[in-house]
Image: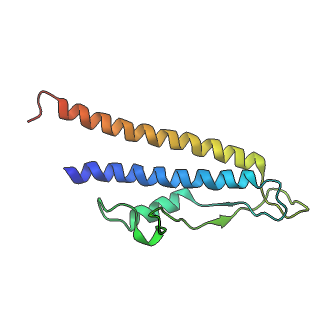
Amino acid sequence: MINRLTDALDFHGQALTLRAQRQQLIAGNIANADTPGYQARDFDFAAALRAARGSAGTGEGIARDILTSQGRPQPALRFLHPAQTNLDGNSVDMDRERANFMDNALKFDATLRFINGNVRTTLDAMKSPNSP
């Protein structure tokens, strides 16, 4: 029983950590939009989450092989291909970065709501007069 509760929270916790890391990466791309030669980077969120979940057992948390020394997940980064070439070699597409930033922020908020909902449901179940 407790494994199911912690597994659901682990999944959302890992997703939240990866969302926060992706948000920092996108913010870095936006901050370097005018830096000559800067190459925009991102990672495949779904693949990173699968890697985190696939190698982690039930209730074990994020896999050790993708964790940094600070205990945060470290997904494989890839360079983004620019939609159009830029003379200074910068590959940041501000329209794409803004869209990715908002999409990731909305999904981060949704993940927080799932966590809050899970905790609230669990607490309500524990307060139930029918519970032993």
Across the whole image, how many numbered discs are drawn on residues? 0
Residue at image position (46%, 43%) is 111
Q: In the displayed structure, would residue 110 be above or below residue 128?
A: below
Q: Which of the two residues, 24 or 53, is positioned nearer the viewer here?
A: 24
Residue at image position (45%, 40%) is 112
Q: In the displayed structure, would residue 128 be above or below residue 62?
A: above
Outermost residue, front side: 70
Residue at image position (61%, 53%) is 24
Q: In the displayed structure, would residue 9 be above or below residue 129?
A: below
Residue at image position (60%, 50%) is 23
Image location (x, y in percent) of residue 72: 47, 61
Q: Horizontal placement of 119 versus 15: left or right?
A: left
Colour approach in the figure:
rainbow
Q: In the displayed structure, would residue 54 be above or below residue 5?
A: below
Q: Which of the two residues, 83 or 104, is positioned nearer the viewer here?
A: 104
Q: Quadrant of residue 132?
A: top left
Outermost residue, bottom side: 65
Outermost residue, right side: 87
Image location (x, y in percent) of residue 118: 33, 39
Q: Which of the two residues, 96 or 75, is positioned nearer the viewer here?
A: 75
Image location (x, y in percent) of residue 87: 91, 62
Outermost residue, top side: 129
Image location (x, y in percent) of residue 86: 88, 59
Q: Which of the two residues, 116 or 58, is positioned nearer the viewer here?
A: 116
